Amino acid sequence: MKHVISPLDLSVEELDHILALAEKMYQNPERYAHLCEGKKLATLFYEPSTRTRLSFEAAMMNLGGKVLGFSSADSSSAAKGESVADTIRVISSYADICAMRHPKEGAPLVASQYASIPVINAGDGGHNHPTQTLTDLLTIKSLKSSLDNLTIGLCGDLKFGRTVHSLIRAMIRYKNVKFVMISPDELRIPDYLRTEVLDKQGISYKEVNVLEPVMPELDLLYMTRVQRERFFNEEDYIRLKDSFILDAKKMKYAREDMLVLHPLPRVNEIATEVDHDPRAVYFKQAQFGVYARMALITNLLGLDGDLSC
Ligand code: NCD
């Protein structure tokens, strides 16, 4: 039995296999419509979510399976003081697989240690978000045709943004990937990522705090929201929240084939006028999220053995 808690829980080969399956599912969803009949997915969400929870649920339904779960800690026994370990022991007898989002870093890892079903981390605090990364990789691979030789701009809240942390860890395994990190000084990537991951593996990156001059270098610009819920005080959030706003004027500096990604939800960091630019692919990215999760569920349930993908 396999769990996906960090993006590194999937080898490059497994990832390539899941992405190839997701692409097939995207092209021909009917073929997979009964694959998970009789199976149940539990979505245990202790923190708010729209896309991640609903895309997990849509994914399981598209595969013919059923879903159960809760969408806030208040409506679960966590409000009575139940531990994640006890909850997952019980859920293991109700469902075949589970996706868990939790505000505490490491909670899905703890759950996986007590579970007898596969546990998927659907976001743990400011730490990791492997299925968003799968979504991002599927989007990049489908629209850029390769995950190699890319210069990726990461912009916004690089300190608390878990999608960025997971994306960096996943992308450094591909050839000749470079990062340009664009953030205010206070929201730079955590030290452990800089020293333990980027420096240690000799990855090329630079950190800047102005967007326009680096725009022409980028193949991808990954915008992120300033993560209000992880700030210790509201004043800092207000000061930093509008540090970067991508608008049509700034898009003029970008290459014709640069893609703009965003895990969503968007607050202010991308002006709505950019939505009409063909390079803005964040809504498409959200759509890919369903297929990425369909492929992952299928793989973790061991149902992809006889699918030639
Ligand atoms: C992201 C998250 O939850 O980390 N959203 C998502 O899963 N699509 C990004 C965010 O909340 O800013």
Image (spheres, rainbow, N blue to C red):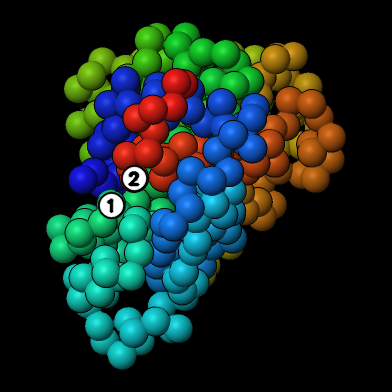
Count of number-bearing discs: 2
| Residue position for label 2 | 301
Name the secondary structure under disc 1: loop
Amino acid, disc 2: Leu
Mark 2 Cα shell of 10 Å, populated few (<14), some (14-19), many (≥20): some
Compared across the picture, whether 306 is left or right of 153 comes to left
- Residue 24, label in figure: none
Which residue is painted at 46% across and 74% down in the image? 70
| Residue position for label 1 | 118
Residue toward you, 288 or 92: 92
Name the secondary structure under disc 2: loop
Q: Is residue 29 above or below residue 122?
A: above
Q: In which quarter of the image is residue 238?
A: bottom right
User: N-terminal of the two: label 2 or label 1?
Assistant: 1
Q: In this view, does 24 lie above or below 32?
A: above
Mark 1 Cα shell of 10 Å, populated few (<14), some (14-19), many (≥20): many
Which residue is painted at 26% across and 56% down in the image? 117
